[in-house]
Amino acid sequence: MSFEPIENYGVIGNMCSIALVGVNGSIDFLCYPNFDSPSVFAALLDDEKGGSFQIQPQLKKKRVRQLYLPDTNILLTRFLAEEGLVELTDYMPIATDGEQPNEIIRTLAVIRGEVDFKMRCQPRFNYAMSGHTVKLEERCAIFSPASDACPPMALHSTTALRQESQDAISNFSLRAGESATFVFGGVRPQGEQPEMEFVEQRFHETARFWKGWIAKSKYKGRWRETVNRSALMLKLLTSQKHGSLIAAPTFSLPEQIGGVRNWDYRFTWLRDATFSLYALIRLGFVDETEAFIDWLKGRLGDDAERGPLQVMYGIDGRQKLDELTLDHLRGYEHSKPVRIGNAAYQQLQLDIYGEMMDSIYLANKYGDSISYAGWQEVLRILEWLGKNWQRPDEGIWEVRGGGREFLHSRLMCWVAFDRALRLAQKRSLSGPLDAWQRIRDAIRNDIFTNFWDDDLRSFVQSKGTKDLDASVLLMPLMRFISPVDPMWRSTMRAIEARLVEGTLVRRYEAERTHVDGIPGGEGSFTACSFWYIECLARAGELEKAQLLFEKLLGYANHLGLYSEQLGPGGQHLGNFPQAFTHLALISTATYLDRVLSGKDDAVWR
């Protein structure tokens, strides 16, 4: 085996777990039974040790097409050759009643010809750190890991299985009209077998679930298929049990090939709250919005080490996310270290308070009103923020080079008090409104006084520097400054000169400024590219914005999915697929469509 490019994967899932399926028919990544559980397959990070679930049609000079069945997260990989045509269908049934097994179903069908196949299921439990035993029963292999960190798993098959070392393999042939099915998941109670005769029924139930869900979208505008695919991806990244949203289903995919910027994104960032709510509200998905807010309410009563709130949490709301390195894995394209956990959970990032308050404001506008107890928690948090908004912090990009006074953090502190004032006035809620207004105005004056550089004619990344940062693109999106203000227009020109390449935007000049305290560089940050385009649209540059938006859509992979970043050659880098990118895509697409259609922007952030 060899490493497949990150963009050569599709994903399947059931809102508990997600698997990455390559165009070669191999599942090379799966954490089970939950998003943040130890990996079972991780060939994406080590193609020798990581483990995979391979299905290989033995075809010469084959071509491959991979697509989602329309309006679903059911993945179809089609292998085409002169001697035969094969379709591989992958999906995870949705546990709508709470009783459906947490499983992957893989069905092979030969459409034309007679084709030989090789199947190898080689789980490597607990991040490939734990061995396991294999027990073969009739067309079933039971994998029992030595570690208690992982549950035993079973592979059921309609073909004969045999054991080879710690793997289950099967070599078989199928003629046109014949099919084979593999079901991989938890061991059923008392040796219960999966009902292979009901696999087709489960396929149709799963298709109906996804089609029924996306049909609730109110979006009927331009780029509808692209927007719907992003929405379906966000739904996959949402925990059905908890209502929280993970940043990405993978860990340690590099931001630079061979570099050390390799992080674990299988957690819930409060920062994503604003963007997820904004995107989902624009599409009309109220249930998901309310579920996320319910999860967020559970965090308001917690106290973290550095303040009332924490930067990120486990999907279940847990606070401790210790960062470890897995030195036995060589990393994607030899990019080490391979990390699990994320030490940034201990950082001070003051912008999360603005994002939290913006989320509560939006939820109150489009959903249920905040409770009395919830408002009391808001009062407590804002009292703390009123005393701490001037502190240096690690900022939106979670730098590891020491705290600074970052513009984006200051901006979002302004948002926190601005949205609290708006909400209190709208809902007639009690609170120290005069004090909040004084703090909000003080923050605004501080930004215009201390974060503007007369030489650059631009707002800068942090106080006392001449560094630029693409996070300033959120200033007009958060309604802090008019998108046609002369100070903003000159800031855009400075960003275009130093951070923009065509339609691609870098977060900051990593290799020049070393602000993040980490060696090496990174690619362009795709969410920032979408922010840039939305800023152009809000400034009235619609023709340019539309052209750049449609060019940026061309950087998606063959399924319309995006990782975190794009490398020098346009290759996908960083964890994949990334919620932040797809959230930004939805925001930009919906806004751009409205203004191109001559409509006012009816959704207030």
Image (cartoon, rainbow, N blue to C red):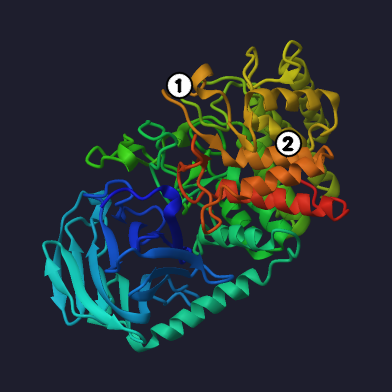
Describe the element under mark 1 as helix, strand or loop.
Answer: loop
Residue 352: image quadrant is top right
Amino acid type, callout 1: Gly
- Whole-percent x, y for residue 91 in the image: 43, 70
Q: In this picture, is 496 found above or below 342?
A: above
Q: Nearer the viewer, mark 1 or mark 2?
A: 1
What percent of the width, then of the height, locates residue 471?
64, 32
Q: Nearer the viewer, residue 131 or 368?
A: 131
Query: Residue drawn at (49%, 21%), measured in percent from left and top?
Result: 511
Residue 528: tell me if it is visible: yes
In-image side of 467 versus 414 (left or right): left
Q: Residue at x 47, y 21 (%)?
A: 401
CA distance separating discs 1 and 2? 28 Å
Ranked by sequence position, the earlier of labels 1 and 2 is 2
Residue pictured at 12% horizontal, 65% vertical: 164
Q: Which mark is residue 415?
A: 2
Residue type marked 2: Val
Could you tell whether 211 is left or right of 223 in the image? left
Pick out the residue farthest to the bottom: 197
* Residue denoted by label 1: 517
Front position in the image: 300 or 54 = 54
